[in-house]
Image (cartoon, rainbow, N blue to C red):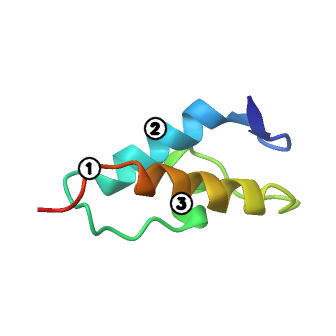
Amino acid sequence: MIICHCNVITCGDLRKAVDDLRGEDAHAMVPPAGVFRCCGKRPRCGSCMPLVSGLIREELSSAPPPK
């Protein structure tokens, strides 16, 4: 599913970016701008930000608990 139409970024692209940004640190901050940077893009119109933020929260909440 395409989340950002301006940059043609899919849900899968964003999930991978969140995982990449977290790396081994379960407490890492994952801001939307960092997710876009990880995808090699920049936010444009911003209408996708609520979806991007929700996807980040969803991805972080489904991650294994920190040790």
Residue at the spot x=51%, y=41% of the render? Answer: 15
Residue 8 in view in this figure:
no
Q: Measured from the top left, where is residue 29 in percent x and y? A: 39, 71
The tag earlier along the polypeptide, 1 or 3, is 3
For this orientation, the residue located farthest to the left is 67
Residue 21, quarter of the rendered image: bottom left
Residue 49, quarter of the rendered image: bottom right
Viewer-closest of 9 and 58: 58
How packed is label 1: few (under 14 Cα within 10 Å), some, or many (20 or more)?
few
Q: Measured from the top left, where is residue 63 in percent x and y? A: 34, 49
Mark 3 lies on a secondary structure that is helix
Residue 62 in view in this figure:
yes
Residue at the spot x=57%, y=45% of the render? Answer: 40
Q: Verify CB contact (< 8 Å) between mark 1 and mark 3.
A: no
In the shown orientation, is residue 62 left or right of residue 23?
right
Distance Cα–Cα, label 1 vs label 3: 13 Å
Amino acid residing under circle 3: Arg
Q: Verify CB contact (< 8 Å) between mark 1 and mark 2.
A: no
In the shown orientation, is residue 21 left or right of residue 42?
left
Residue at the spot x=64%, y=62% of the render? Answer: 53
Q: Which mark is residue 16?
A: 2
Amino acid residing under circle 1: Pro
Mark 2 lies on a secondary structure that is helix
* Disc number lying in front (2 or 3): 3
Amino acid residing under circle 2: Lys
Q: Measured from the top left, where is residue 20 in percent x and y? A: 36, 45
Pointer 3 residue? 57
Pointer 1 residue? 64
Distance Cα–Cα, label 2 vs label 3: 14 Å
